[in-house]
Image (spheres, rainbow, N blue to C red):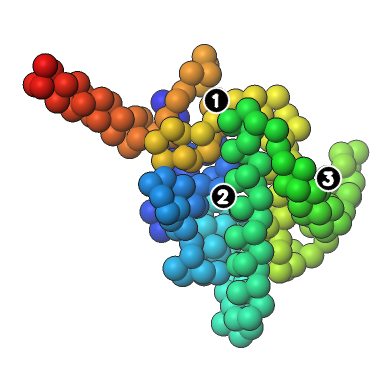
């Protein structure tokens, strides 16, 4: 059973990859989808980024200051975050459902990747090459982290084990030994489905 972490806002982190957890800040089912970040906007995004260790506390303090002084700027970042999340959700949902990834989704991802890589610089530490961010206060820094997580997953063998929970619609990486994990979380969706089947069977027996 994979371990479950919960953010300070009560958002479950069950995706197993940063990019999937980001997609899961929207709960697709039941319809209409519920956006866990939308009500509070940028501050909620900022808290999620701290809880998932994308940002260090000093960076979070800086971005919080930007939010207090230039709310239009952080509102724009939040809207970009929602667009990125939509693209990644389309991407990994297609993967999980073994459908062809729409070309416009790949085109959008490509643009995000170009932006993210442009912000990185290769430096040598001893004989080891490292990638560092050119600007640790870049307004879209948090989104670049998520984009690179999506790139890593897309180009790795792990992509074969990206799944979608048949209950809530969340995406997750199935890292279990036999790759037979079905639910996002057995205690939540798995048990709900089991209970539903139990009640349907009982109703069926009662009416027989
Ligand atoms: Zn679920």
Vertical comparison of 39 with 3: above or below: below
Q: Which of the two residues, 196 or 117, is positioned nearer the viewer here? A: 196
Describe the element under mark 1 as helix, strand or loop: loop
How far apart are the two marked residues, 1 and 2, measured between alpha carbons? Answer: 18 Å
Foreground disc of the pair 3, 1: 1
How far across and how far down the image is residue 25, in percent?
A: 50, 52
Describe the element under mark 3 as helix, strand or loop: strand
How far apart are the two marked residues, 3 and 1, measured between alpha carbons? Answer: 27 Å
Which mark identifies residue 111?
A: none
Which mark identifies residue 175?
A: 1
Mark 3 vs 1, N-terminal side: 3
Report the residue at 76% width, 52% height from top.
Answer: 108
Mark 3 vs 2, N-terminal side: 2
Which mark identifies residue 130?
A: 3
How far across and how far down the image is residue 158, in percent?
A: 65, 27
Q: Which of the two residues, 43 or 203, is positioned nearer the viewer here? A: 203
Position of 101 with respect to 187 (left or right) is right
Look at the image and tell me in which quarter the N terminus lies.
Answer: top left
Describe the element under mark 2 as helix, strand or loop: helix
Report the residue at 57% width, 42% height from top.
Answer: 20
Image quadrant in which you'd find residue 139:
bottom right
Q: Which residue is mark 2?
A: 22
Mark 1 vs 2, N-terminal side: 2
């Amino acid at each position: 059973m994979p371990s479950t972490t919960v953010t300070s806002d009560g958002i479950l982190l069950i995706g197993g990859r940063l990019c999937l957890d980001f997609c899961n800040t929207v709960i697709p089912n039941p319809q209409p989808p519920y956006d866990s970040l939308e009500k509070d906007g940028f501050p909620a995004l900022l808290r999620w980024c701290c809880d998932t260790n994308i940002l260090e506390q000093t960076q979070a303090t800086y971005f919080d200051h930007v939010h207090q002084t230039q709310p239009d700027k952080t509102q724009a970042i939040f809207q970009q975050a929602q667009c990125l999340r939509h693209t990644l959700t389309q991407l990994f949902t297609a993967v999980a459902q073994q459908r062809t990834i729409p070309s416009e989704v790949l085109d959008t991802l490509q643009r995000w990747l170009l932006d993210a890589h442009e912000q990185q610089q290769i430096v040598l530490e001893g004989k080891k090459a490292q990638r560092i961010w050119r600007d640790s206060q870049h307004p879209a820094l948090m989104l670049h982290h998520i984009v690179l997580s999506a790139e890593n997953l897309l180009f790795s063998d792990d992509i074969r084990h990206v799944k979608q929970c048949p209950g809530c619609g969340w995406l997750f990486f199935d890292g279990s030994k036999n790759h037979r994990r079905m639910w996002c979380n057995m205690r939540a969706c798995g048990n709900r489905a089991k209970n539903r089947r139990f009640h349907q069977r009982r109703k069926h027996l009662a009416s027989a």
